[in-house]
Image (cartoon, rainbow, N blue to C red):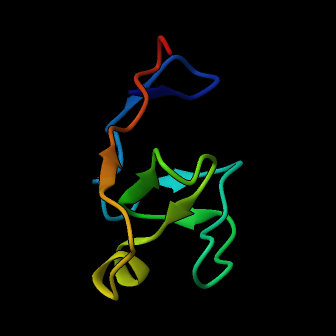
Amino acid sequence: MNTWARGEKLARPSPDQFQWEYVSCDGCSMHPLIGQRYTCKTCGNYDLCEECQKKGHEHELTIEKQPDDDD
């Protein structure tokens, strides 16, 4: 959960709305990457959005879990 200045807790965004602030999609260059994030462990530092993941990639992709507030 995110916290506003008044101390109120906000619900976490759904996975399809989450913004990966410092990540760009290597397929379509979306920045920040919004939604599900897929990474390629073989290519290293290679990220795809959900739409580009659907187009396929030569290696296995792993879906990244949204970080917790404590991460």
Residue placed at 54% from the left, 59% from the top? 47
Q: Is residue 3 left or right of residue 57?
A: right
Question: Percent x, y for residue 34?
Answer: 50, 65
Front in this rendered view, residue 32 or 48: 48
- Residue 55's quadrant in the figure? bottom left
Front in this rendered view, residue 2 or 36: 36
Residue placed at 42% from the left, 57% from the top? 37
Is residue 58 positioned above or below 5 on the image? below
Is residue 11 positioned above or below 55 on the image? above
Residue placed at 42% from the left, 82% from the top? 52
Is residue 4 positioned above or below 53 on the image? above
Question: Percent x, y for residue 58?
Answer: 39, 73
Q: Is residue 60 left or right of residue 31?
A: left
Which image quarter is the N terminus in? top left
Question: Percent x, y for residue 62?
Answer: 31, 49
- Residue 11's quadrant in the figure? top left
Q: Is residue 26 left or right of residue 39?
A: right
Residue placed at 30% from the left, 58% from the top? 60
Question: Percent x, y for residue 3?
Answer: 51, 24
User: Which residue appears farthest toward the top when viewing the image?
Assistant: 70
Number of marks: 0
Is residue 51 positioned above or below 70 on the image? below
